[in-house]
Image (cartoon, helix red, strand yellow):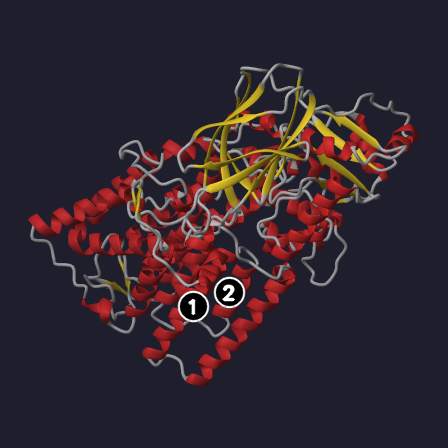
Amino acid sequence: MALVVPSRHAYRWGQTGMAPVNGGPMRKTGERLWMLVAALLAISFCYVWAGPVAFSPTSVEWLNVGDRAMHTLGWWFFREAPWAWPPGASPKLGLELASGVALSDSLPLFAFPFKLASPLLPPTFQYWGFWYLLCFALQACFGFLIARELNLGRGMAFAAALFCVFQPAFLDRIPGHMALGGHWTILAALFMYVRRDPPPRFAWPLLLGVVALVHGYLMAMCGAIWLTSLAQRLWLRRIGFVGLAAEVACSILVVVTAMWMGGFFMVRSFGSGGYGFYQLNLLALIDPSGWSYLFPDLPETPGDYEGLNFMGAGVLLLIAATFVAVRFHHAPQLGWAKLRGARWLPIVVLGVGLTLFAMTNKLAVGNFELPAIPLPTWVTDLAAVFRASARMFWPVGYLLLFAVLLAANRALGRRVLWFVLPLLLVQVADSSARWAKFYRREAPTTEWSTSLQDPAWDALAERYERIRGVPVEPIFWDWKELSLLALRHHIGLDAAYLARVDAKSYEALRIAGIRALAEGEFDTGAIYVMRRGAALLARRHMQPGDLLAEFNGRWVFARGGKDRLRDARLPIPDGLPQALPLEPGIPVATVEANRAYIADYMLSGWSDPENWGTWTDGMEATLVFSIGAMPNPVLHLIAAGLPQPDGSPQRVTVLVNGEEVDGYNLSERPSDVVIPLPAGLAGEVFMTFRLAGPSRPSDHGGSDTRLLGMALRSIELRSE
C-alpha cells in the first residue's frame, strides 16, 4: 500500500495515481470546487439533521436540556458580566466556584466576539447554530484536504470528506457537548501533519490558539499531534533546532494566553473522578451503541456511553471488501513498510499511545472488565484531568478511516469508487438510526420555559443579591431553573453546573452549607433553596421575620424574607416543613425512579440515588421521618456495606434523635437489617448512621472519589 507517493502532481477523478495532471490555476480552481461542493453538502445535511429552529439566533428553547443548557447559560452569564481580568471571567456563575467561560464549555472562540458585539445583538441570542454549520463545513473541508495530501483522487477525496461528516463519534458528540463537537480541529491538525510541504511557521501556533478557545480535550489531542509533527519534521530535517525552539516558544505562549483569557487558570485543579470508568472498550470500533440498523449492539460496561467510537457500517463493509480483494482476487498487496519510516512512524506511535490512554488501566471487552492495573497515585491524578479517556481515541479513529480509504484505493484500483460511493450511502442511511432523532421540532421561541411560576420567586430574586443551594452538591439538583432565575434578575448563584470546579473552593462552600443548616450561619443576602429534609434543619434557626416556605415544590429560606414579600405586596405562606410520615408496612425504595420522593427523607450524608439504591457519602448519614404512636416499632433496612480499609465488615452505629440505640455489622451482600426503635417513640425522628470505616474506591485503584460506607436499598417501618 503506497501510503506516501513522492509526486506532488494532481490526479484525475477516480484514478489511483497513474496519470498526473499539470498543475496551475485550473487545477487549483478544480480542487476548490470539489471541496466547496463537499462543504455545501455537509452544510445541507446539517440543516436537515438539526432542523431550521436551531439556526435562528433568537430561538433558544431547543437548548433548554442537559449539557446544552449548561453551555448556553455559561454564555449568557458571561455576556452579562462586565469585562475583567482575565477577559473570560464570569463571577456570578458559581460565586465562590466561579471560573471563566471556558469551564462551562461555552466556546470562548465565539463567546468573545459575540460579547464584543453584544450591544448590537437582540436580548436573547445563541450562536450554537452558527457553530454547527461551521463544524460540518470544516469537517468536510479538512477531510478532503487530508485525502488529497495522501494522493487520493478527487472522487475519493470527496468521499473521504463525507465519511468524516458521517462519523458516528462526531455526530454522537455534537448535539450534547456542543463545543466538543469541533472534530474539525483534529482533522486540521492531522492535515498539517500529513502535508508533504511543511506548513507555514504561523500555522501550528494559530491552530493551537484557536483550539484552546474551543475545548480542553480537543486542545490536548491537537497538542499531541503537534508534538508528533515536531518529531517528524526534525527527523526529516524539515526544521532545525532554532526553528523548533521558536515554534515551541510561540505555540506555548499562544496557548497559555488563550487559556488565561478563557479563564482556565481561575481554578487550581483540573482533576476529577471517572478515569477508568469512561474507558475505551476493546469492542468499541464494532459496537454501534444504537448507531446502526445492520450491526447489533454489543454488551457494554456502564461508562461506555462516553466512548462511542463505532466506525460506521459503510467503513466496516469497506474493510471487508478490501480484505476480500487482497485475499481472494489477487489485488496488489498492502505495503506497510513505509509506516516504519520517518514520515509515518511518529503518528503511528502517537496512535498507539492515545489508544493505551483511552483504554485506561481497566481493560474492558464487552461487559467484562479485568481488575484494574495498579498505577501510582500521581499517574492517576494526572490522568484524571482527562477522565473521559475514551475521547482520546478520536484522532486514532480518523487515522484508521483514512488508512481504510488508502487500502481500498490500493486494493480495488480503478473500481474503487464503485465500492466506496455505495458504501458511503450505506454509512449515511445506516447511521440514521441515531442521527435522524436529533431533528428539533420545537417552535421557535426567545424564552426558556420554567417551572418557577410563583410570583414570590421574582419578588425575592429582585430583593436579594444571591441564590444558594443547600446542601451543596457537585451538580445541584435544581441548577437549571435557579440559574435562569438568577440570570433574569442579574444576580449570582452557587447552585451552578460547571464542567470543572476548584476542589478547595468546593470543599469550603460545602462546609459553609453544612454550617448554615447545622448552626444557622446563613448568608443574609442570599435566598437558600433546599428540599424538605434540609428545610427541617433550617426551621431550627428561624428568627422573627425569616421566611421558610414552599414554592413550586422547593423550600426557600431567606433571612428577613417575610418583609421582602410584604414589600412586594405578596401573601406570606402559612405552615412550616414537617417530616414526611413513614407508613407502617410500606417500603420506601431508594431507586432512581423515586429520587425526588426519597430525597425528602434523606437529610444529609447521602450520595445521589442510583438504579439499585443509594450510598452514604461521608462519616455519617441521617434520615428524617415522622411516625405515629405504635407498639414495638422496628425499622427494617435492606442494606450492604463496603468493607473497612483493614478488611473487616463495615460497622454502623445508629442514633435516634441524638441517642445511640443500636449497632450492627454490614455484609457485602444486601441483607435485612433490623433496628428496634425506642418504645413510645412518636413524632419527628432524626436517625443517624455513623460509619466506622468508610473508604474511597479511588484509594484502591478505582475511579470513585466518594467516601462510601453503607449501601441502602429500602427502608420499612413495622410493628413487631
- Whichever of labels 2 and 1 marks the residue nearer the N terminus, that label is 2
- Asked if the residue at tag 1 contacts the one at tag 2, i.e. Cβ–Cβ closer than 8 Å, the answer is yes
* Crowd tier of the residue under label 1, counting other residues whose Cα lies within 10 Å: few below 14, some 14–19, many 20 or above: many
In-image side of 205 versus 345 (left or right): right
Foreground pick, 141 / 539: 539
In-image side of 107 versus 88 (left or right): left
Query: Which numbered marker is on residue 636?
Result: none
Q: Is residue 274 visible?
A: no
Foreground pick, 15 / 186: 186
Foreground pick, 643 / 202: 643
In-image side of 622 versus 557 (left or right): left
Return the x and y of residue 529 as percentages of the image width and height.
72, 35
Which residue shows up at 26% across the image and 53% down it?
405
Which residue shows up at 26% across the image and 70% down it?
7
Q: Which residue is mark 2?
A: 208
Q: Which residue is mark 1?
A: 226
Return the x and y of residue 261 as percentages of the image width and height.
64, 62
Quadrant location of the N terminus?
A: bottom left
- Relative height, residue 360 to residue 458 (above, below): below
Which residue shows up at 69% across the image and 45% down it?
76
In-image side of 605 versus 392 (left or right): right
Whole-angstrom CA distance, mark 2 to mark 1, is: 9 Å
* Crowd tier of the residue under label 2, counting other residues whose Cα lies within 10 Å: few below 14, some 14–19, many 20 or above: many
Assign a secondary structure to mark 1. Answer: helix
Return the x and y of residue 447 as percentages of the image width and height.
69, 32
Which residue shows up at 69% across the image and 28% down it?
532
Assign a secondary structure to mark 2. Answer: helix
